[in-house]
Structure formats: C-alpha cells, structure tokens
Image (spheres, rainbow, N blue to C red):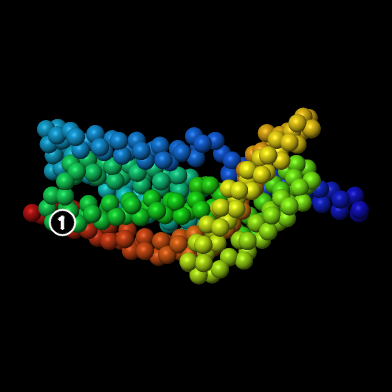
Amino acid sequence: MAAVTETVSQMTQQQDKNVREGHLSQFTLPVIVKLLPVIALTIAIVVCLWGMQVNLQNYMTPAQGMGYALGILGGSMMLALLLYPLRKRFRRLAWMGATATWFRIHMVLGILGPTLILFHSQFTFGSTNAAMALAAMLIVAASGLVGRYLYTRIHYGLFGARATLRELELDSAYAREYMLPAIEADDGLCEALRALEDTPARAPHSVAGAIASMLRVRAAVKHLSRQVDVAIDRFARTQPAVDIGMMRRLARAYFVAITRASGLQLFERLFRAWHFWHLPLFIMLIVTAIIHIVAVHMF
C-alpha cells in the first residue's frame, strides 16, 4: 500500500512539474513566435497601403467581377467569425473540431475578411449604406485587436488555458525554487522577491489602484531582475556544471509570471467589459451589411 501511495505521489508531482514547465514555457517563447500575429497584421496593413496607392478602378469594380467576388468572400469570412463563439458556447458542436482550432481560424478570418472588404470597397466609403457597413466593419476589426491583446493578458499565450492568480503564484514559486541556489546567499534579495510575490494578492480592487499596483510591480521587476542576473552570473562562475541557460530562462519566466499576476485582476475586468460591447458591435456590423447588400441588389 505504501508503495502504491508513493507511486501516486510521484506521478502527481511529475504532472504538476509538467504543468508548471508548460506554463512557464509560454513566458519564454522565441521572439519570432510571439510576433507571428503582429507580422500577419503588418503584412495585411502593407497590402492595404499598396491597394490605396493603386488605382483599383482600372482593374475592378465593386458591382461585378473580381471586386464583387471579393465582397462576397470577405463578407462570408466576417460571418464565419461567429463559428468560434458558437463552438465555444455549445458543447453539441464538438463535432466541428477543437475550440483551439476554431480560435486560430477566427484570428485568420479576422484579418483576411476586413482586408478583402477594403479591396472590395476600393478604400472609399461610397454610398451612405456602404459607408455605414464599412465603418461598422472597421470598428469591429479594431475591437477584435483590442480583444486579442486583452485575451493574451489573462491566458497562457494565445492558445493556452485561462490563467488564475493561484496558478501564476504556483508558477512563480516553481521558478524561484529552480534559481534558489543562485540567490539564497543574498538574504536581502530573497526578502525582496518574497515581498514582490505577495504584491499581486494585495492589489486594490479599484481600477486606478490596480493600475498603480501593476506599475509598481513592473518597476520592482525591472530592478530586481538585474540583481538576479548578477547573482546567476556569480553562481555560474562557481558552478559551471549547472544548466545556467535553464536557470536564466526560468528567472525570466519568474518575473513574467509575477508581472502577469499583478495585472490579472485589471485585465480580467477590461476583458469582461470588452466582451460586453464586442457582441453588440458585431450585430451592428451584420445589420449594416445586410442593409448594404439589400440596397445594392434592389436599387
């Protein structure tokens, strides 16, 4: 019985270790991976800037041919954006595929759809009904970018699990244990790090107070991370056999986890507020798009 209990305990510890390392790895991703969504958005912006410089009237018209097809395709992509929230909300739609897959599709369509619509409109507002539909689309697209940023502040990356204060505290504690050999000789640094770890749990509930607390944590992180780097450098000279690279990565992840924890409450509130307004904006887009389509085909 004791052997079974010990085996279960070891398995639990290994599972927790895998979870912590999985969370922390999201905080130390290569820069190119973090920038992929930004790169995709930048490419779309560059293409749109090129389109604005080209006299598109010489090549297509919104009423027929390629210009008309771009409008249909772009509008279909915008409508398909509804598939992700529907898949996320209704379990009966599990046959459609994983929610994470639809989230990726949602992001791609959120860039491609508006880009095609802009080319369809030839970067002009046109008639009143077209202007209303285009303005609504631009507002929804901008709102989507804001939502994407807020989403990453309260999740482990774009496709990771929802973060909680408890999980972030466990992540930072795990990382601290790994770098403890390098910092344990400095009592002042250890005490400062413990005080830093306690700060997120004591963050004020007011928006202004939460912002001020988050800024204080960021300032402390900037200062203490330099001290930890110095301590690791000193430790590396005396313990060359230790995986210093791993210690440095976990040290960076440690400070990211604390920074995320300090702003978690604030960004959760902002995300809820964004979620409340984004759906009505999207409904407004659908309504104006329908009015535009009806007006174009009836008059």
Q: Position of residue 22 (x, y in %)?
A: 64, 44
Q: Residues within 10 Å of mark 1 (few under 14, many from 20)?
A: some
> Does residue 12 appear in this view?
no
Indicate left or right for 56 with 157 as reference.
left
Nearest the camera: 272 or 215? 215
Task: Determine whether the residue tagged by mark 1 lies in a helix, strand or loop.
Answer: helix
Q: Is residue 56 above or below residue 268?
A: above
Residue sitting at x 48%, y 66%: 208
Label 1 sits on residue: 129
Quadrant of res 132: bottom left
Quadrant of res 295: bottom left
Nearest the camera: 106 or 97? 106
Quarter of the image that includes the C terminus: bottom left
Quarter of the image that includes the N terminus: bottom right
Q: Position of residue 179 (x, y in %)?
A: 73, 43
Indicate left or right for 232 with 215 as reference.
right
Residue sitting at x 71%, y 38%: 232
Nearest the camera: 181 or 41? 181
